[in-house]
Image: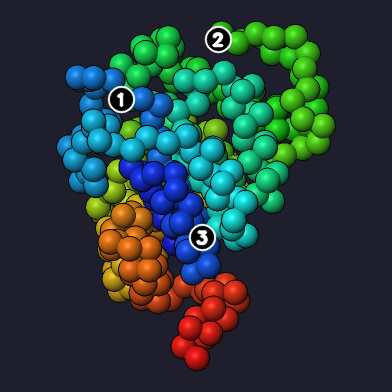
Amino acid sequence: MGSIGLSAYGMTVTELVELAVCADELGFDALWLGEHVLRPAGYGSEHPTTGTVQHHATIVDTDTELIDPWVAHAAIAAVTSRIKLGTAVYVTALRHPLHTARTTISVQELSGGRVLFGVGSGWLEEEFAALGVPFRTRFSRTEECLDILRKSWSGTDFDHSGKHFTFDRIQVHPRPAPIPVVLGGNTAPALARAARLGDAWFASGTPTPDEAVALVTELRRLRRESGNTEQFPCYVRVSTTDPEVLADYRDSGVEDLVLWADTLWTGDTPDERRRNLTAAADRLGLQPSPRSVLSAAGQRN
C-alpha cells in the first residue's frame, strides 16, 4: 500500500501550520513544501516542465507567497506528531551545505525523524545571480552538497576538498541524524541522478498518468541496471481524489501519490477548510489519528 501526501506552495507560513495540523490528524503521509528565496523582476527563465500540465500558471509572481521551508517545518514539527516534513524541492546549491546540514539536523531531531529532504538543482537563473551563485555549476554543486550533507548527518569527523567547497576536519553533530534524500526532476539527466544518488524521487509538476508510469518505469530500470535493489519510493503529484483513478495509478506501479493542497484546503474560514480537507481524506480512505477520531466524536455528541 502506497502513501498519499500533500504538496503546498504559495501559502503563508501561518496557513501552512494550520494545514499541517489538520493533515496530521487526518492521516496524510507527508506535507511537501516548495520554495524560492526571492522573485527576480522580469525573469526569463523557464521551468523545466514547461510544455506539460502546470498547476501554477506562473511559478514566481508578484503576489506569490514565498517562505523558508525549514522555518515552516520547525513550526509544524512542534504541533504535529505523524506527518512527514518534505521539501519539493529545496535548491541546495544556493546555500553552503554546512549551513543546510545544521538546519536540517535541527528540524530532523525536533520532529523525531520525520524529514524528507527533497532536492532540486534549480532552474531560475536570475535567482542564482541575485545570490551570487554561478548557475552553470548548479548540477556539480548539488552533487557536492549532497556528499557533504551525508557526511554531516553521519555524526563523524570529516574534511572536504572539492570543486566548490574546501574545509579542514570538522564535526557538525555529535551523533548520526540520517535524512532520506529525495531527488526531483523529470529529465533524463535528472532521472539518472536520482537513481544514482537518491533514496527516493519526486516528480516535477503534475505529470499525466501515462507520463508518471513512464517516469517511474525508467527510474526502476536505471536502479536495476546499477544493481540497487533497496526500496526506492517514487512520489508523483496527481490532480484527482477519485479512488478509482488513484487505484489505476497504483495498479500501474505508481504507489506514492501527492495531491495539491490548495485543491483540497479550500474555503473562506478555517472551519470550512478543515471540513473540505476532512471530506477529501474520507474519500481517500485515510486513517485519522485517535485524537482526531475522539475530537470528531465529541463534536457529534
How far from the left and from the top, in percent, is residue 238? 31, 56
Residue type (three-letter) at the residue carrying disc 1: Arg
How far is disc 1 from disc 2 in space, using C-alphas? 25 Å
Query: In the structure shown, which secondary structural element does the residue marked by tag 1 occupy?
Result: loop
First in sequence: mark 1 or mark 2? 1
Q: Give the total number of marks visible in the rendering.
A: 3
Res. 244 image quadrant? bottom left
How far from the left and from the top, in percent, is residue 170? 77, 17
- Residue under circle 2? 164
The one of 223 and 140 positioned closer to us in this rendering: 140
The one of 11 and 215 positioned closer to us in this rendering: 11
Disc on res. 21 = 3
How far is disc 2 from disc 3 in space, using C-alphas? 39 Å
Q: Is residue 231 visible?
A: no
How far from the left and from the top, in percent, is residue 99? 61, 23
First in sequence: mark 2 or mark 3? 3
Q: Is residue 139 visible?
A: yes
- Residue under circle 1? 39
How far from the left and from the top, in percent, is residue 297? 52, 86
First in sequence: mark 1 or mark 3? 3
Crowd class of label 3 (few under 14; some 14 to 19; many from 20; radius 10 Å): some
Q: Do the residues labelled 1 and 2 touch (CB within 8 Å)?
A: no
How far is disc 1 from disc 3 in space, using C-alphas? 29 Å
Residue visible at 72% across and 39% down in the picture: 177
Crowd class of label 1 (few under 14; some 14 to 19; many from 20; radius 10 Å): some
Residue visible at 23% across and 43% down in the picture: 56
Crowd class of label 2 (few under 14; some 14 to 19; many from 20; radius 10 Å): few
Residue visible at 28% across and 63% down in the picture: 267
Specify whether 228 is left or right of 38.
right
